[in-house]
Image (cartoon, rainbow, N blue to C red):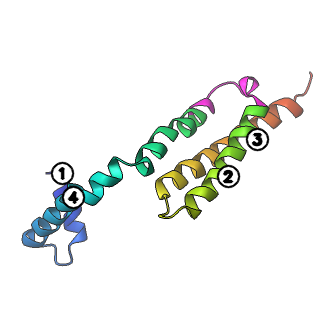
Amino acid sequence: MYYAKFIKFLTPDGSKQSAKMAARKLMKYLSGKEMRDWLTSTHFWGPFATWSIPIAAIADTQKDASLISGKMTFALLMYSSIFMRFAWKVNPRNLLLLSCHFTNTCAQLTQGTRFLKNKYSKTDV
């Protein structure tokens, strides 16, 4: 049980008994109705699918900057900025979606900076 070591840090006295109790509470929570409802809702699967966008943007930072589309980078930056606000304002707050769009905003800002440097700071030798 790998999580038993982690649970040991969470227990106040560090005893085996409290670690077992904490592990039982964790398993009860993870297998409970609230968790099942969350895992089968759009509050989980929407952000889960949306994570492909920032992952692709982060992977693209290793590619040549001449391949970057300025229009698409700007569109994705605006998209993530708007949906970051939505994720914060929706009730209940969707922190998974917020973190996804925050990551994408940072990745798109990085790509935008690379695009501008590539387009406007070329020096002919």
- Residue 20, position in %: x, y? 10, 65
**Which circle, 4 or 3, is nearer the viewer?**
4
Q: Which residue is mark 3?
A: 113
- Say what secondary structure mark 3 lies in: helix
* Structural distance between the alpha carbons of marks 3 and 1: 42 Å
- Residue 56, position in %: x, y? 56, 32
Q: Which is more toward the observer, 15 or 27?
A: 27
- Say what secondary structure mark 2 lies in: helix
Q: Report the side of 49 relative to 81 (left or right).
A: left
Label 4, residues with CA under 10 Å away: few <14, some 14-19, many ≥20: few
Q: Which residues are magenta?
A: 59-70
Label 2, residues with CA under 10 Å away: few <14, some 14-19, many ≥20: few
- Residue 117, position in %: x, y? 81, 36
Q: Which residue is mark 2?
A: 82
Q: Report the side of 100 relative to 122 (left or right).
A: left
Which badge, 1 or 2, comes first in the chain's sequence? 1
Quarter-of-image position of residue 107: top right
Q: Which mark is residue 2?
A: 1
Residue 62 can be seen, yes or no = yes
Q: Report the side of 36 relative to 99 (left or right).
A: left
**Which circle, 3 or 2, is nearer the viewer?**
2
Q: Residue at x 21, y 64 (%)?
A: 7
Q: Residue type at mark 4: give it.
A: Gly
Q: Are marks 3 and 2 in contact (CB under 8 Å)?
A: no
Q: Which residue is mark 4?
A: 32
